[in-house]
Image: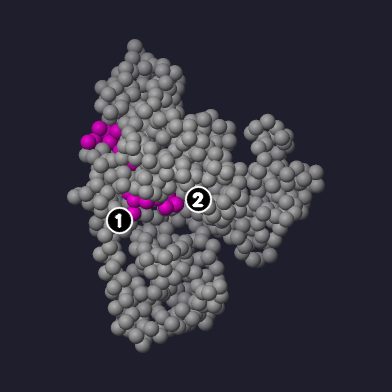
């Protein structure tokens, strides 16, 4: 019998809709039911592309005996962490405080008053590797609830009090934005943690450091630091040549399980690909690297081809697992190859070449003798170790053969924040490489967010599916990332309406997410559902923190409009980056990137000229390609009221002209694209 999840909008919840477990969504009625029955609550949190979430579901939640025990002794609540990052954040903090670690699936037992008292992540069906079996855990929790209730409620109350009263670690951040000293300190800290042999930072597992790479590229552009550029460029090359990158279809997996970027965890997330698409486009802008150009375009192509929904938005993720052809769901089955499989598709001669080119061996680099495709040798980009045309033919044939395999599942909910990241990436990539189709895809996604997710008064819905908004209110990252995407789109398209919509979102940020006394930002709105702690975290995770994403959008909006209130809000919010820059630079990369833009101005570029004019178009593209960190661009005809930056800026001698300003000082207008490029590349330190 279908449980209460059958009407959910989350694909993750729908994956559990036919479980024998009598699941509830996170809602007051679930806790009322637990109170009525006098039983504890099992809170299970995960997401659709999480491998171990699937494993635990198959082992335990699809098991009739386990489900019967759960249904008799618990109220079971299933949460998609991507829909409810606030619920995930506060209970993950409790898990980490209690156990010293966290992850998904997250398993927490609560009182009917939502107070946590027992914690874990994945539990196997039977005891192994020092972990208790899940049914064993359920029996222990039930016994404690039935026989030692007073002790359980006392522990739960103490946990909640300790967490609620814990001083926020950012309370002493102040409201002074970081400057040159903090940028230098952050760069030094990153240099110490950098892996010069393999690129990236730290050991295994190794995650793509997207936000840090953006900071390094902006810092190089502003200061000329070759060390910053080297770290960014080498890391990008290592990732693109490794198994982390899909050598056939483009796009990046979530992370590498090893230090060498060889074997990925195969799930593909929208946020990773949006961020990395933009990073590689910016790397090309700084260096002209053909590898960076190819990867940016292929990653954009992957997003449009495989993640775009019928409504024009972008789906959240592709699963790591897929059918291996025998009915088993196996991690990586869609992506890996054996020499025999190459020969079956290509014939012996081309298979031998493909094996050498992509690093496929008899021993394999993954499981059961299969290999993840890599580019271990410098080849087609750098001088013809292999015949480029022949390799491209092989690549195409392998891709077409892979298309016949059972594809990984897709989580097709549209998350506002991640679509904001995709809008920015596709708009810029389309503009840089003269791909109007990519810009059009960005416009379609922005249109969906405005039509379906946005309400001028209620704010922003976090998710939608099939063109229907979910019930979950947007969190700070949604407002910050969507505003960033819309501001970027406005600069690329010359359509000021996107800037207006960004302004509406940032109005909500200032009114509902900001502490008026300190300027600090919260992850949830003041009128959002009250949990035992209001989440607040300025550090990056897999995507930019909401705090620094909002700071960046506020700064860009202020540069566009001249709003001192928005600039002040941005600078106050950046105070936390000043605190963290030398402590944990790896985890505040987006804040550092925003701080680079602030130190540089950011520069304001207004291109005035008739729409459709070749001269206007060339100046506009030059402005977009100008590598000034975080520069904002407006374009439109003389007298246009779409952008404040265009006001009182005439043509020069009847010709289209560009106006560049920074820190309340403007250069003379120019009609020369070459002069504009020189101006935008001028360093500030």
Determine whether the residue tagged by mark 2 lies in a helix, strand or loop. Answer: loop
- In this rendering, does residue 297 appear at all? no
Reading the image, the residue beneath label 1 is 169
Q: Quadrant of residue 40?
A: bottom left
Give the residue at x 41% y 18%. Answer: 675
Give the residue at x 56% y 73%. Answer: 129
Question: Does the segment drawn in magenta span residue 513?
Answer: no
- Quadrant containing the C terminus is top left
With respect to residue 306, does 185 lie above or below? above
Reading the image, the residue beneath label 2 is 202
Provide the residue span drawn in magenta.
Answer: 536-564
As drawn, which residue projects farthest toward the right?
Answer: 348
Dot 2 crowding, Cα within 10 Å, few <14, some 14–19, many 20+: some
Question: Does the segment drawn in magenta span residue 541?
Answer: yes
Measuring from the top left, give residue 234's x and y in whole percent: 54, 39
Left or right placement of residue 439 versus residue 330 in this view: left
As drawn, which residue projects farthest toward the left?
Answer: 517
Give the residue at x 49% y 81%. Answer: 136
Q: Quadrant of residue 624?
A: top left
With respect to residue 585, does 137 lie above or below? below
């Amino acid at each position: 019998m279908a449980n209460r999840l059958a009407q959910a909008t989350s694909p993750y919840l729908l994956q559990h809709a036919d479980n024998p477990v009598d699941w509830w969504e996170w809602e007051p009625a679930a806790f009322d039911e637990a109170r009525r029955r006098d039983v504890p609550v099992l809170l299970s949190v995960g997401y659709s592309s999480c491998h171990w979430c699937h494993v635990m579901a198959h082992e335990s939640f699809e098991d009739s005996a386990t489900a019967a025990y759960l249904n008799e002794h618990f109220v079971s609540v299933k949460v998609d962490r991507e829909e409810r990052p606030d619920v995930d954040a506060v209970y993950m903090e409790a898990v980490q405080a209690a156990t010293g670690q966290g992850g998904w699936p997250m398993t927490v037992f609560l009182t009917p008053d939502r107070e946590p008292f027992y914690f874990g992540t994945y539990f196997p069906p039977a005891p192994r590797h020092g972990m208790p079996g899940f049914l064993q855990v359920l029996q222990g929790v039930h016994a404690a609830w039935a026989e030692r209730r007073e002790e359980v409620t006392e522990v739960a109350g103490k946990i909640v009090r300790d967490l609620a009263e814990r001083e926020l670690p950012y309370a002493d951040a102040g409201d002074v934005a970081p400057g040159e000293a903090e940028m230098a300190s952050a760069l030094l800290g990153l240099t110490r943690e950098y892996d010069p042999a393999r690129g990236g930072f730290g050991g295994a597992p190794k995650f793509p450091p997207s936000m840090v790479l953006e900071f390094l590229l902006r810092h190089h552009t502003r200061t000329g630091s070759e060390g910053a550029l080297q770290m960014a460029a080498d890391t990008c090359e290592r990732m693109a040549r490794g198994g982390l990158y899909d050598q056939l279809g483009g796009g990046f997996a979530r992370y590498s399980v090893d230090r060498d970027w060889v074997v990925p965890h195969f799930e593909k997330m929208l946020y990773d690909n949006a961020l990395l698409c933009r990073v590689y486009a910016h790397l090309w802008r700084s260096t002209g690297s053909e590898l960076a150009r190819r990867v940016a375009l292929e990653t954009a192509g992957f997003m449009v081809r495989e993640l775009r929904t019928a409504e024009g938005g972008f789906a959240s993720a592709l699963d790591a697992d897929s059918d291996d052809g025998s009915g088993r769901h196996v991690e990586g089955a869609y992506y890996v190859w054996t020499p025999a499989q190459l020969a079956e598709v290509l014939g012996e001669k081309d298979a031998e070449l493909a094996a050498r080119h992509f690093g496929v061996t008899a021993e394999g680099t993954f499981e059961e003798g299969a290999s993840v495709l890599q580019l271990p040798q410098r080849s087609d980009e750098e001088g013809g170790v292999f015949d480029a045309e022949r390799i491209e033919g092989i690549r195409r044939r392998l891709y077409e053969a892979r298309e016949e395999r059972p594809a990984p599942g897709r989580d097709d909910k549209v998350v506002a924040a991640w679509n904001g990241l995709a809008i920015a990436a596709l708009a810029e990539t389309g503009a840089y490489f003269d791909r109007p189709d990519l810009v059009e895809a960005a416009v379609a996604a922005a249109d969906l967010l405005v039509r379906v997710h946005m309400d001028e008064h209620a704010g922003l819905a976090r998710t939608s599916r099939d063109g229907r908004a979910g019930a979950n209110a947007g969190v700070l990252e949604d407002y910050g990332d969507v505003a960033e995407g819309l501001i970027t789109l406005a600069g690329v398209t010359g359509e000021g309406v996107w800037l207006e919509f960004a302004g509406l979102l940032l109005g909500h940020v200032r009114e509902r997410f900001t502490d008026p006394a300190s300027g600090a930002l919260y992850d949830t709105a003041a009128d959002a559902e009250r949990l035992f702690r209001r989440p607040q975290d300025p550090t990056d995770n897999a995507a930019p923190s909401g705090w620094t994403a909002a700071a960046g959008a506020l700064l860009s909006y202020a540069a566009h409009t001249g709003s001192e209130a928005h600039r002040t809000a941005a600078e106050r919010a950046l105070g936390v980056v000043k605190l963290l820059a030398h402590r944990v630079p790896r985890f505040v990369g987006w804040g550092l990137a925003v701080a680079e833009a602030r130190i540089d101005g950011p520069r304001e570029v207004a291109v005035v000229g008739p729409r459709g004019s070749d001269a206007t178009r060339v100046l506009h593209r030059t402005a977009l390609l100008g590598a000034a960190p975080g520069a904002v661009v407006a374009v439109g005809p003389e007298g246009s009221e779409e952008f404040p930056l265009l006001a009182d800026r005439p043509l020069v001698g009847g010709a289209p002209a560009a106006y560049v300003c920074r820190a309340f000082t403007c250069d003379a207008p120019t009609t020369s694209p070459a002069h504009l490029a020189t101006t935008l590349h001028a360093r500030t330190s």
